[in-house]
Amino acid sequence: MIRTLAKTLALVAALAAPAVALAGPTVDAIKQRGALRCGVNTGLLGFSAPDSAGRWNGIDADFCRAVATAVLGDPTKVQYVPTNAQTRFTALQSGEIDLLSRNTTWTSSRDATLGSVFAGTLFYDGQGFMVKKSSGVTKAADLNGATVCVQPGTTTELNLNDYFRTKKMSFKPVVIAELNQIEQAFFAGRCDVYTTDISGLAATRLKAPKPDDYLILPEAISKEPLGPMVRRGDWEFLTIVKWTLFGLIEAEEYGVTSANVDKLRGESKDPPIQRLLGTTGDAGKGMGIDNDWLVKIIKAVGNYGEMYSRNIGPLGIQRGVNAQWRDGGLMYAPPIR
Amino acid sequence: MFKSERARGILYQALLLAVVGGIVWYLLSNTLHNLASRGIQVGFAFLGREAGFEIAEKLIEYDSTRSYAHALAVGLLNTLHVAFLGIVIATTLGTLLGIARLSSNWLVARLAGAYVEFMRNIPLLLQLLVWYGIFTELLPGVRQAIRIGDWIIISQRGFRFAWPEAHPGWNAAFWALVAAGLLSLIWRAVVRRRQAATGQQWPLALPVCALLAGLPALAWAVTGAPTTIEIPVLRGFDYQGGKVISPEFTALLVGLSTYTAAFIAEVVRAGIQAVDRGQGEAAMALGLSQGQRLRLVTLPQALRVIIPPLTSQYLNLTKNSSLAVAIGYPDLVAIANTTMNQTGQAIEAIAMLMAVYLGISIAISLFMNWYNARMRLVER
């Protein structure tokens, strides 16, 4: 009797509640825990690497902060979970992490068969080669017969193989999983070439005993759109992550920065900026989060351009394809409205 | 029915089996359900797909267009290769060290003792990293390689040496050697039977040597006597031609053998010390020579004690070879890891890994148990 009554009341309450968006299981879990569990790289300069004080830096780590701000309103409420190339998908599938923000390449098979989906592209990368200057190699076509250091189980390994096969060249792979180990082997001279995404090469080059002894070859042999990944089926959380990314990009497009965001929020009469910052419209509410979500995010980590110049800039990588679409790049966010 | 001890026993066992089976079934169905609900594909269909990655060391034909199953077979053979050679070297080295520890020479005994304590008290992974460091960082680069004549070249890219050019004559010689080995075994059986029946000793060593040397030489000569030797030459990034042993393989083999040898040394020492001193004295009293005493009296009795723990050491070495993944030797685990990451089929790949290691271990155990049974004290 009591049970029936309780059920009826619950149903009535559910029907009677105002039409707000459902939060979804991942958001509920994050709120209950009070922190976003974010899978990051164990240590890749510019993307996610802990500094001497134990603070995680990098564009991937900053994206974790942005999502934590969107859901919890606080960029410090992130638990970073370092993952390697092998454990990252399992960590996401098993629910150990809520978000994988770890320089992961967006491919069809990863979208389709791993039980998780990509939310967009945070950084357009491409695979390249780095050699010792003393080897005299200046272009990828010179690499026939070279010994190549490569990390296993990544798209890198497959691209490497495709490239040499189509060019009818041969190579000998040296395959080591641990990043530090393989960098060590390359610096020691075990390999002629080290291959990974160009951003990764730039980070590795800075770790070399003498960075100027090494040369990153001009060719990119693949498309590597790196982006955040979430579990399949939780559409509410996917929407939040996707629009956090778009929001960061659009903020740069309209010139909203961490320095002027408060001022613009109070003064701007520009409709797109008003919608972006939640003074008009219901962009945040529709996703079940605060309407001033982007204001908090931009205060915490800045817009996309600020994130880029703070993290990727020191690696010496130009904006290139990662520039705004107006500047000839690929960064194009759908409108927030 | 409960009064019968036998019936009760069967009932309890049936109950236990049902509980274990139930748990396994529950875990399995739960996993499958979870995978399906998360949109993860299950099954072994991925094994037939093109692997798409290159493997540095292979004992059979392989290129990146072959299937995942083929790549895993390459990895399995690499594991068996390093495990087999590791077992041979570790046994030899371990036996010598074990005997050395019992030496009456103070220095030899102490050195052997120090080796054992040093090697077995440092984690194997650390030792492997040290060996890999030695072979890749302390050896000179390709252009400054150490050259011993034109024939042997030592650099951080490995040990490269001249090797006969591929020719059917060499294959024929190899199979002739195998045949000679089998014939030698048969001859030994004939000689033994003869001695048991009549007491006469027919020559054994000389005909066996003649067989092992003569038959391959004959086969080689008949099939065209190839003599071309491939000499390594520096071309492009590296030396080409001849055979090469990679630093990854060398580091793994040396690391595994020297580590396991320390344990085997202790096993051998314990085995020899377990044989009663009176046995040797009795053999001496019977007029057996020093060699006969060791071979016919001491060793057979020591082996009874040595073999069971030795089996464990062989199993350890084989399983430890999976640490190869840390230093880039493409063993089964390394290939399975790559496969797992590219296909996302972690559960299937891990299940296969476990099944394969279990299979290898059981095979080694069966062989060693058979050997143990042969060596057992036969009481008459």
Image: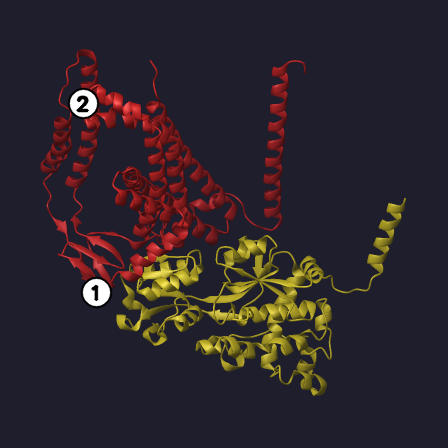
Chain colours: A yellow, B red
* Chain for numbered disc 2: B
Q: Is residue A28 left or right of residue B108?
A: right
Residue drawn at (86%, 50%) of the image: A6
Q: Which mark is residue B214?
A: none
Crowd class of label 1 (few under 14; some 14 to 19; many from 20; radius 10 Å): few
- Label 2 secondary element: helix
User: Dot 1 lies on which element?
Assistant: helix
In-front residue for pair A114/B188: B188
Looking at this view, is A60 or B315 the one in front?
A: B315
Is the N terminus of chain A in the top left, top right, bottom left or bottom right quadrant? top right
Q: Would residue B50 be visible to someone looking at this image?
A: no
- The residue located at (26%, 44%) in the rendering is B108
Residue in the picture at 16% in, 41% down: B170
Which residue in the structure is indicated by mark 1?
B144
Callout 2 crowding tier (Cα within 10 Å): few <14, some 14–19, many ≥20: some
Identify the mark nearer the N-term, 1 or 2.
Answer: 1
Residue beneath label 2, please? B187
Above/below status of A86 relative to B354 = below
Please, what is the three-letter code of the amino acid marked with disc 1?
A: Gln
Does the residue at mark 1 contact the one at mark 2 (Cβ under 8 Å)?
Answer: no
Please, is residue A200 above or below residue B270 in the view?
below
Q: Position of residue B38 (x, y in %)?
A: 61, 51
Is A49 on the left-hand or right-hand side of A168? right
Residue B118 vs A176, above or below: the answer is: above
Residue positioned most to the top = B198
Residue B380 higher or lower than A147, as above or below: above
